[in-house]
């Protein structure tokens, strides 16, 4: 079992920055690829970013490329999402997710993730 707890959300003006953190329980964090997803009101959950279990590969949604950066610290069992140049369209609940390396090498598909956090709200004002 892996438990995930997100933090770092909040209210920020357009053009500002936030850094989300996701702390994972357990001793096998390094065996999991990690992803960030988001869901805005009335919309489906969408992929934001992912980082491979080994940390060597990342992938991003086109809408956040060049603005968001995903990283991980396996010693701290934590994955981060640095969000810069935030736009009102980035307003959503952000979720982190973990997918075991045997079936997930860094996937944009929600079904490839076994564990999910409770989410953290990000609101960007114009």
Image: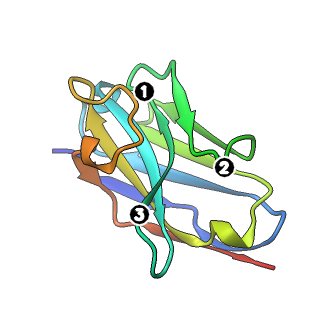
Q: CA distance from mark 3 to mark 1?
A: 20 Å
Please give the name of the residue rendered at 22% of the width and 28% of the height, measured from the top-left corner. 103
Task: Indicate the quadrant containing the N terminus: top left, top right, bottom left or bottom right.
Answer: top left
Picture mark count: 3
Q: CA distance from mark 2 to mark 1?
A: 18 Å
Q: Report x, y in % for residue 21.
A: 52, 51
Q: CA distance from mark 2 to mark 3?
A: 15 Å
The residue that disc 1 covers is 52
Q: Is residue 71 visible?
A: no
Q: Is residue 93 above or below residue 100?
A: below
Residue 54: which quarter of the image?
top left
Of residue 11 and residue 78, the one placed in the foreground of this image is 11
The residue that disc 2 covers is 64
Q: Report x, y in % for residue 125.
A: 75, 79
The residue that disc 3 covers is 45
Residue 18: mark: none
Disc with the residue nearer the chain's start (2 vs 3):
3
Whether residues under marks 2 and 1 lie with C-beta atoms below 8 angstroms apart, the answer is no
């Amino acid at each position: 079992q892996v438990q995930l707890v997100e933090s770092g959300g909040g209210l920020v003006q357009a053009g500002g920055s936030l850094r989300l953190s996701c702390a994972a329980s357990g001793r096998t964090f390094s065996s999991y690829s990690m992803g960030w997803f988001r869901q805005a009101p009335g919309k489906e959950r969408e992929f934001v970013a992912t980082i491979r279990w080994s940390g060597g590969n990342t992938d991003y949604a086109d809408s956040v490329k060049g603005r968001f950066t995903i990283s991980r610290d396996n010693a701290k069992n934590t994955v981060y999402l640095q969000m810069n140049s935030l736009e009102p369209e980035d307003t959503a609940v952000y979720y982190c997710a973990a997918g075991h390396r045997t079936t997930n090498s860094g996937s944009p598909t929600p079904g490839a993730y076994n564990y999910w956090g409770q989410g953290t709200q990000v609101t960007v004002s114009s």
